[in-house]
Image (spheres, coloured by chain):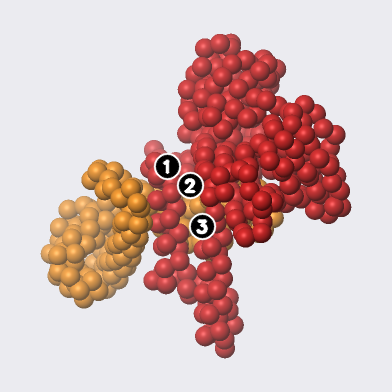
Chain colours: A red, B orange
Amino acid sequence: MPAPTPDHQTLQEAADWFARLSSEPHDLAQQHAWQQWLAQSDSHRQAWRYVERVSQRFAPLQGDIDTASQTLQALHHTPSSRRQVLRTLSVISGGLLLGGLAWRHDALTEQLLAWQAGYRTGTGDILERTLADGSRIWLNSATALDLDLGPSQRSLRLYAGEVLIATGPDPRPFVVHTAQGNLTPLGTRFSVRERAARTQLNVYEGAVQVRCSATHHTRVAKAGERLSFDQQSVSASEPALAGREAWSKGVLLAEDMSLSQFIEELAAYRRGHLGVDPEVAHLRVMGTFPLRDTDQALAMLAGVLPIRVEQTFPGWTTVKPR
Amino acid sequence: MPQSPDPSNVGWLYQEHHGWVRAWLHKKLGNSSDAAELAHDVFVRLLSKPKAFNSEGHARAYLSAISRHVCVDFWRRQRVERAWLEVLASRPEHCMPSEEHRAMVLEALQQVQAMLERLPPNVAEAFMLAQLQGMSYQAIAAHLGVSPRTVTHYMSKAMFQCLLLEAELDEALS
């Protein structure tokens, strides 16, 4: 007999779990609580099957994400989507109908521009670009940035993710902006990553000046150094992680890394959840692994460590003891 | 006089109602071959979930509702296909995908669009960026200029609407 349709409250709970689990995919306590919720009743499990089904509806589009995004975006902004116009109009006071429409148009144009902004990579993609000034940039997985090569300045705004930059010789200064501050390189190769409200910097050649946005505190990092900063202050510098640069070649280079750290790195290239059982989290990993095929990387890992890779359901993978 | 919920009954309903359903669809779509195909869909849907009607009016009201649904789906499908072809045509490496691939992608696009069009624009965009592009909440928050908490709220809201749709689909098929 098919499971009965879950009631609205159960569907709302399932939706909340989905939102929280995907917001903090590494929170083990939360996963535990979610599993308890699942175990509570058939209707909870049925609601979760709907969550999986919704996610699976996107699956056939993963082959060409750009085309799918652009199509949906175009549909999203087509006025023939009457329901949407009506919904928007319903929040605008009735007397200002014409003004309201004009406002809506501007808001949409702005949104459209933001959506199409600059350079973006999906999860698992690594993109290399040579810029008009001869600089080269590599975008790591799930990265979004804007670029402006103006007459007096070259500026790059990093919204999310990580970028590796090799600046080309050009009289215009090159400035990288993040939510935490800005970085001014001096003929150099360096990577910038935004993560957990901090900007992380690795300098491989030359030097980079860092400036915090709130305190205007500045510091220069030289080749071979790594540091991080938030809006207030800059951390002490440590030796740069040479292996960190390997992603630009599509490789995860593990030099005696813990399995938990390895999985965290790999998870950034993979859709859905990728976790590790605490029992094997301490194992050490050595070697080079392909980032463009994370299934293969996991299979290679299972070949050298006493682990197995378990797929509970599509999009939910855990590394467990063998 | 109540009719029994017997699939064979659909044959009788077809005899009685197919004519006006088809005429109504023709008027809506302005095209007789599309109307014939969609009229067929209306009765296929009825066949997948046979229903007992207690009056002629009840049957008519129900069939009108299904016909409207079929029309909405048809228009959406057309809009989706047109938008998709335009995007493909704008590509420098303009190449036509295989028929199979085309059918699969269009079906998925139309399902996703059916979910997204129920959502307010910001919520739909956040949901699409997460589900399709695999962006983190933090990246989406930066992109939309809202807090990560708001993104979590958007995601829950979007998923809830999608779950309602899934539940409706299940009910329609059970």
Residue under label 3: A116
Do pointers 3 and 1 mark residues of a single chain?
Answer: yes
> Amino acid under label 2?
Leu
Q: Position of residue A55 (x, y in %)?
A: 47, 44
Q: Considering only vertical position in the picture, is B24 above or below A213? A: below
* B48 and A129: which is toward the camera: A129
Return the mark for residue A62.
1
Mark pair 2, 3: CA separation? 15 Å
Do pointers 1 and 2 mark residues of a single chain?
Answer: no
Q: Position of residue A282 (x, y in %)?
A: 70, 17
Picture quadrant where residue B29 is located: bottom left
Q: Earlier in the sequence, mark 3 or mark 1?
A: 1
Task: Please tell me whether mark 2 sits on a helix, a strand or a loop.
Answer: loop
Q: The N terminus of chain A appears in which quarter of the rendering? A: top left
Label 1 close to label 2 by CB (< 8 Å): yes
Mark pair 1, 2: CA separation? 7 Å
- Mark 2 Cα shell of 10 Å, populated few (<14), some (14-19), many (≥20): many
Disc 3: host chain: A
Query: Residue at 56% of width from left, 84% of height from top?
Result: A99
Q: Position of residue A201 (x, y in %)?
A: 73, 38
Query: Residue at 35% of width from left, 57% of height from top?
Result: B90
Disc 2: host chain: B
**Camera-side mark, 2 or 3:** 3
Q: Considering only vertical position in the picture, is A131 above or below B121? A: above
Query: Residue at 62% of width from left, 39% of height from top?
Result: A166
Q: Tell me if B86 is positioned left or right of B161 in this view.
A: left
Return the mark for residue B132.
2
Disc 1: host chain: A
* A175 and A245: which is toward the camera: A175
Task: Please tell me whether mark 1 sits on a helix, a strand or a loop.
Answer: helix
Label 3 close to label 1 by CB (< 8 Å): no
